[in-house]
Image: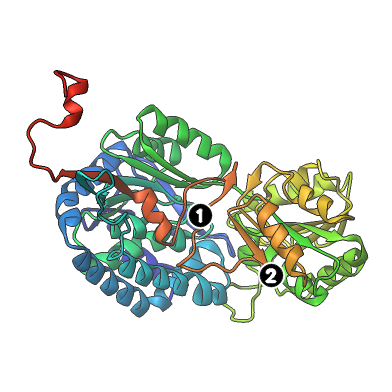
């Protein structure tokens, strides 16, 4: 796919994928997919309405008996073919992901797409390894064992920051466990989710197993979450919207999985490798232009290293190259939209009243002025209870604060409502181990920040939500645990019956 015209051609039938076919939405409202690097519209489509959600759920419900009844080996084989199709189309996926998101092509090519292919391969294998307790006679008279069964139609909602990867994180564990799914991607970035579903069809995954409805949250999203035939909701997005999703889901007694906001601390102890910490902070803060719920956003640096850390991060940030996302040398692309750029800028401008903007803090001019670009920004001197320290900014902004004792550093790290990810930087094993124990986050890295792997779970504490994506732990979200118990005595009158009638 070489340009926006081909995108329009590929999705000429619409941005809804229901029962194995693209079709147009029925809401009567149109939406534009905009390249945030240029402001140009690359695709226009009609949003999904409630009738489209109903059709997608019906397709998923119809496909459920056959897919859930397939053997684990059959599902695994289909998903291995799926991974192969994704790998064959890797260049197309990388191009379209960068086109709709503004990601540097090197990020799409080296992170988003291969990560998605690897996730697919992992869950193809995991489909054959659902865990349960071994069969045993726990009371002596009965044999018990545990079954894991598919739960039904899953309704999932994915965000705009990693559209392809988030589609995979929602779809793959659900279908590997035998469920069928209706996914609502963000309406501003639907294209790679649609491509993902089509690739599944090309791989031979049956029609209706994966369905995509692309509509607004208030209409399509809320209708999907509240749909009576949807038995589980999985949502990734902001904590505020997550609360609304939870209200709707719990009113219909659905299983609920929430992966919400983050404000990851980056704790640098005074024995840390300073060069490694500086490099890690810049990379961890700026990945995906900071639009990452696990991005390093709050650097706490022990006083002896504080000044050198601030200087090192500022100098390295100033070398980061903003530019055309399709230029292989570009390090940092635009934010997802001008509205998001202005939101980020607002945090920084308000912070000038109580903190120091060490570097950045502005949108570039010149050739980049038409895009939603914002320079890498380092803020120092803010108080712990200030807005820029406590609130999720979701942009290329790192705040740095000093601390004195280890107790203080860990206390400050835990002092926000969030608990998704964190990192600790130290050469001391005991210090690092203490940080991993006491920092309240779903992932704590030591001497690195950001790497993820398919085999390990992703999910948070506190206001960052609950439940896990990736890894075999995700099957706990997408399977129903059933206890089966067999009588082994062949005795008609059991001893325990006397508690209900008769004597021993």
| Residue 356 is at least partly visible in this image | yes
Q: Residue at x 20, y 29 (%)?
A: 496
Q: Residue at x 58, y 46 (%)?
A: 461
Q: Residue at x 37, y 78 (%)?
A: 87
Query: Can you give x and y, in whole percent of width and height, for residue 58 in the image?
Result: 20, 43
Q: Image quadrant for the C terminus?
A: top left
Q: Quadrant of residue 330?
A: bottom right
| Residue 1 is at least partly visible in this image | no
The answer to which of 10 and 61 lies nearer the viewer is 61
Q: Is residue 91 above or below residue 149?
A: below
Q: Residue furthest front?
A: 504
| Horizontal relation, residue 239 to residue 21: left or right | right
**Label 2, on which residue?**
283
In this rendering, the label closer to the viewer, 2 or 1: 2
Crowd class of label 2 (few under 14; some 14 to 19; many from 20; radius 10 Å): many
Query: Can you give x and y, in whole percent of width and height, for residue 320 in the image?
Result: 73, 73
Crowd class of label 1 (few under 14; some 14 to 19; many from 20; radius 10 Å): some
């Amino acid at each position: 796919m070489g340009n926006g015209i081909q995108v329009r051609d590929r999705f000429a039938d619409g941005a809804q994928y229901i029962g194995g076919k693209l079709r147009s939405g029925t809401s009567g409202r149109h939406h534009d997919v905009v390249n945030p690097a240029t402001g140009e519209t690359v695709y226009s489509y009609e949003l999904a309405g409630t009738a489209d959600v109903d059709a997608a759920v019906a397709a998923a419900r119809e496909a459920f008996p056959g897919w859930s009844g397939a053997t684990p080996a059959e599902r695994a084989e289909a998903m291995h073919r799926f991974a192969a199709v994704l790998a064959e189309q890797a260049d197309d996926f990388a191009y379209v992901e960068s086109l709709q998101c503004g990601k540097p092509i090197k990020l799409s090519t080296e992170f988003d797409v291969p990560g998605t292919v690897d996730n697919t391969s992992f869950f193809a294998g995991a489909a054959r390894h659902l865990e349960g307790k071994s069969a045993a006679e726990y009371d002596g008279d009965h044999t018990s064992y545990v079954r894991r069964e598919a739960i039904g139609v899953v309704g999932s909602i994915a965000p705009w920051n990693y559209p392809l990867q988030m589609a995979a994180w929602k779809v793959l564990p659900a279908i590997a466990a035998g469920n069928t799914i209706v996914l609502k991607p963000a309406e501003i970035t639907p294209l790679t989710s649609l491509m993902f579903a089509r690739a599944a069809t090309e791989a031979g995954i049956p029609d209706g197993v994966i369905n995509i409805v692309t509509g607004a949250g208030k209409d399509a999203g809320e209708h999907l979450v509240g749909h009576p035939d949807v038995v589980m909701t999985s949502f990734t997005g902001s904590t505020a919207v997550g609360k609304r999703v939870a209200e709707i889901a719990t009113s219909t007694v659905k299983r609920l999985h929430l992966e919400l906001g983050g404000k990851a601390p980056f704790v640098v102890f005074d024995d840390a490798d300073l060069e490694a910490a500086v490099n890690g902070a810049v990379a961890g803060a700026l990945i995906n232009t900071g639009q990452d719920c696990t991005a390093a956003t709050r650097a706490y640096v022990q006083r002896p290293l504080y000044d050198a850390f601030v200087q090192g991060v500022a100098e390295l940030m100033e070398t980061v190259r903003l530019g055309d996302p399709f230029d292989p040398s570009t390090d940092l692309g635009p934010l997802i939209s001008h509205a998001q750029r202005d939101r980020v800028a607002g945090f920084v401008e308000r912070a000038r009243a109580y903190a120091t903007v060490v570097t950045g803090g502005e949108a570039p001019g010149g050739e980049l002025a038409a895009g939603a670009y914002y320079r890498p920004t380092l803020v120092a001197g803010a108080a712990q209870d200030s807005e820029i320290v406590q609130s999720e900014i979701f942009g290329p902004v790192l705040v740095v604060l000093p601390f004195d004792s280890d107790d203080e550093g860990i206390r400050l790290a835990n002092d926000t409502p969030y608990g998704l990810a964190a990192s600790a930087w130290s050469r001391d094993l005991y210090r690092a181990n203490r940080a991993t124990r006491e920092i309240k986050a779903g992932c704590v890295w030591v001497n690195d920040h950001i790497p993820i792997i398919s085999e390990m779970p992703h999910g948070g504490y506190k206001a960052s939500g609950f439940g896990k994506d990736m890894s075999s732990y995700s099957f706990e979200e997408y399977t129903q645990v059933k206890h089966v118990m067999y009588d082994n005595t062949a005795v008609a009158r059991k001893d325990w019956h006397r508690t209900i009638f008769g004597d021993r």
